[in-house]
């Protein structure tokens, strides 16, 4: 168990600058998730920590040791791969024992550790099988087992659940979480799935095009995204964005476009003031929209035309047209709306987000 | 399997297949029949009343006995075996390392080096034997098995390298990366993880290399002159055709016995060999 420090990390492949000045302080026992769309540099960052990819510039420290020039085997890490990477010619037991054998542990100790790990993961019955005789979930368990028998300083996960079906993915996600609580080993986890990131991470690092966009606890990212990209990436269904013009009238700021005119609440107005007369982007999460009732102040309402109704049981997703923009509203399951209905939607004024139209940074 | 009416299956499957099988196996059958045919039948004119070209009425092992006792055939067999095995081992060893390096290591000119190796394989032996003959003479290796053991790898190594390169590329990179994180050096990851998984590929490369050197003709013909040093293909064709006399019985017996080791090797490893060529790693 050890902290991991990533300082000014860069990776350039011939033309592509895959990882750009990444700085991360990962505390001991912390579970940090790197998330972003494919090609954002998250896997490359992880592979540089693992030593599988050379570092163009910058430093990686595990514990208090710079590991830039150490071979992967000398970094005391364990990695779980997306395609499990089980050795096909070895039994489950030998797969799990391989790392210990390479490190010249004695037989009894190897047997003890493998049994222990198999017990934790519930795979004692599979120890004699070959990987090809296992299901996807079992294979991933073996891959996890192979990582934990070594008692490494850091666990690295490279999209470990992406090859599993949806139901199994949820189940394994819970198991990884439990496993981390139990072992307390520092973990870096790469995924493109924001739900995995939100549920697993103590802290989440959102990346795009090689740059870190924001680092924070899951709710921090959700509530106060640093820019439009993070706002749109975190949360499902994704945040709605509408271009608006800011104007001043009757002592208040108003955000308006052809389909809406919303009064900006006082606490946001202070920050939005410099944008008076300019364009910016309004962001509102689907769950912050609801069907308006008679008591709602009209300056926080939107006129919407229903385009699609998606029944999810626990809620209803309405794809609506508000002026020129399409938005999604997650409303109560009791709402009975039909296509082409006209509705008034109320926004939650405390949860409006504004972004600079040019830089996309949050205002 | 072909679906549909019975006649369709016959027309499109069984008949073409049997035509193919018969035309493939007929030369071997001819070889076998001629081996056991007595001379009196061999030289019987085709219009003779008891002319039986496709079978024999009085099978004999006379030619096999003659081949083994009167010629150096068993020596040629040993020569060929020795040369084929040693040159296959050399080529496999070099091919393994080269194939691994070209498919896995990142270094400058890796791509062009790979292409270069392939191009040397494309240079026909019928051209290459001329400069090689000069080299063999300069090193005074002529007329010894080493002339062949050291020249066969000129086409076996590129062949093995390319076959194994393709095979290594099909093995997921993560397996090796995982091993290296697990505590194996690159060398150990190669020996404990990659090579065991590549066994089908290695076997097929080995079988091919063995067959190619077993059947090789032109180098053996050019670099070897004394009868006791010859290989089977050269020995049979040069020693059993004396002037314009073809000793058909012995020739065919030599061809038959000479093809047994190769057939044996193939049938023994056929499953690995098919897996090696269709190249699939599941894990």
Image (tube, rainbow, N blue to C red):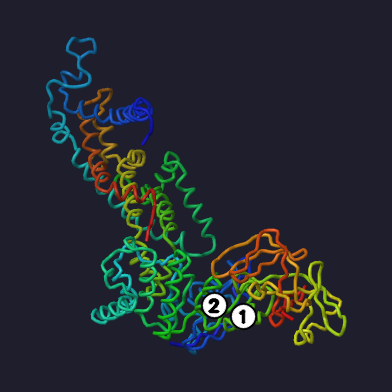
**Relative side of A189 to A255, left or right:** left
Q: How far apart are marks 2 and 1 (CA)?
A: 9 Å
On residue A198, which mark appears?
Answer: 2
Q: Where is residue A22 in the image (x, y as percent from the top left)?
A: 61, 79
Of all chains, the one bearing label 1 is A
Label 2 crowd bin: few (<14), some (14–19), many (20+), radius 10 Å:
many
Which percent across, then down, holds residue B78?
21, 45
> In terms of depth relative to the viewer, which is nearer, B263 or B209?
B263
Going 42% across and 72% down the picture, which residue do you hit? A172
Residue marked by disc 1: A221
Badge 1 crowding class, 10 Å Cα cut-off, few under 14, some 14 to 19, many 20 or more, is many
Question: Mark 1 or mark 2, which is nearer the start of the sequence?
Answer: 2
| Residue B148 image position (x, y, % from top left) | 33, 47
Residue B10, x across and y down, in percent: 34, 27
Q: Please give the name of the residue rendered at 52% of the width and 80% of the height, measured from the top-left corner.
A: A201
Quadrant in which the N terminus of chain A appears: bottom left
Q: Is residue A337 left or right of residue A180?
A: right
């Amino acid at each position: 168990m050890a902290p991991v420090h990533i300082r000014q990390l860069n990776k350039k492949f011939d033309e592509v600058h895959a990882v750009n000045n990444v700085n991360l302080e990962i505390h001991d026992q912390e579970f940090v998730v790197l998330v972003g769309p494919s090609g954002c540099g998250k896997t490359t960052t992880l592979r540089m920590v693992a030593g599988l990819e050379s570092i163009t510039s910058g430093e990686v420290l595990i514990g208090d040791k710079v590991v830039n020039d150490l071979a992967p085997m000398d970094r005391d890490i364990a990695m779980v791969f997306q395609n499990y990477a089980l050795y096909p010619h070895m039994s489950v037991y030998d797969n799990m024992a391989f790392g210990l054998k390479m490190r010249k542990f004695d037989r009894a100790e190897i047997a003890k550790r493998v049994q222990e790990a198999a017990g934790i993961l519930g795979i004692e019955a599979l120890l004699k099988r070959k990987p090809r005789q296992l299901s996807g979930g079992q294979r991933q368990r073996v891959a996890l087992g192979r990582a934990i028998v070594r008692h490494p300083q850091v666990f690295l996960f490279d999209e470990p659940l992406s090859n599993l079906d949806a139901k199994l993915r949820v189940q394994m996600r819970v198991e990884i979480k439990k496993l981390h609580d139990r072992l307390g080993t520092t973990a870096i986890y790469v995924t493109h799935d924001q739900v995995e990131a939100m549920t697993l991470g103590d802290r989440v690092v959102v990346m795009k095009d090689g740059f870190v966009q924001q680092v924070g606890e899951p709710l921090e990212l959700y509530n106060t995204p640093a820019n439009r990209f993070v706002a749109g990436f975190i949360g499902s269904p994704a945040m709605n964005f509408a271009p608006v013009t800011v104007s001043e009238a009757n002592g208040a700021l108003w955000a308006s476009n052809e389909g809406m005119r919303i009064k900006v609440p006082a606490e946001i107005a202070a920050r939005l003031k410099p944008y008076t007369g300019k364009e910016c982007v309004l962001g509102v999460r689907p769950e912050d929209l609801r069907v308006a009732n008679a008591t709602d102040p009209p300056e926080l309402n939107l006129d919407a035309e229903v385009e699609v109704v998606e029944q999810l049981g626990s809620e209803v997703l309405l794809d609506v047209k508000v002026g020129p923009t399409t938005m999604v509203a997650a409303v109560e399951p009791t709402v009975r709306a039909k296509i082409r209905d006209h509705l008034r939607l109320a926004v939650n004024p405390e949860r409006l987000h504004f972004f600079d139209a040019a830089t996309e940074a949050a205002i | 399997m072909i679906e549909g009416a019975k006649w369709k299956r016959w027309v499109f499957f069984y008949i073409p297949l049997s035509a193919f099988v018969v035309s493939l196996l007929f030369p071997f059958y001819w070889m076998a029949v001629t081996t056991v045919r007595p001379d009196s039948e061999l030289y019987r004119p085709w219009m003779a009343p008891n002319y039986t070209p496709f079978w024999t009425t009085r099978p004999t092992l006379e030619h096999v006995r003659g081949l083994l006792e009167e010629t150096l055939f068993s020596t040629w067999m040993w020569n060929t075996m020795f040369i084929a095995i040693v040159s296959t081992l050399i080529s496999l060893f070099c091919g393994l390392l080269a194939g691994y390096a070209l498919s896995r290591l990142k270094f400058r000119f890796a791509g062009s080096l790979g292409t270069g190796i392939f191009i040397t394989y494309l240079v026909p032996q019928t051209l290459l034997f001329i400069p090689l003959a000069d080299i063999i003479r300069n090193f005074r290796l002529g007329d010894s098995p080493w002339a062949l053991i050291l020249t066969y790898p000129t086409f076996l190594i590129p062949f093995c390298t390319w076959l194994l390169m393709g095979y290594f590329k099909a093995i997921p990179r993560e397996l090796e990366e995982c091993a290296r994180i697990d505590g194996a050096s690159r060398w150990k990851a190669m020996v404990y993880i990659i090579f065991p998984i590549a066994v089908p590929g290695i076997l097929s490369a080995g079988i091919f290399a063995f067959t190619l050197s077993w059947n090789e003709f032109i180098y053996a013909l050019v670099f070897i002159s004394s009868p006791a040093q010859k290989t089977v293909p050269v020995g049979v064709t040069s020693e059993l055709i004396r002037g314009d006399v073809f000793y058909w019985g012995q020739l065919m017996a030599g061809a038959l016995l000479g093809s047994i080791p190769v057939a044996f090797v193939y049938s023994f490893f056929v499953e690995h060999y098919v897996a090696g060529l269709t190249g699939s790693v599941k894990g």
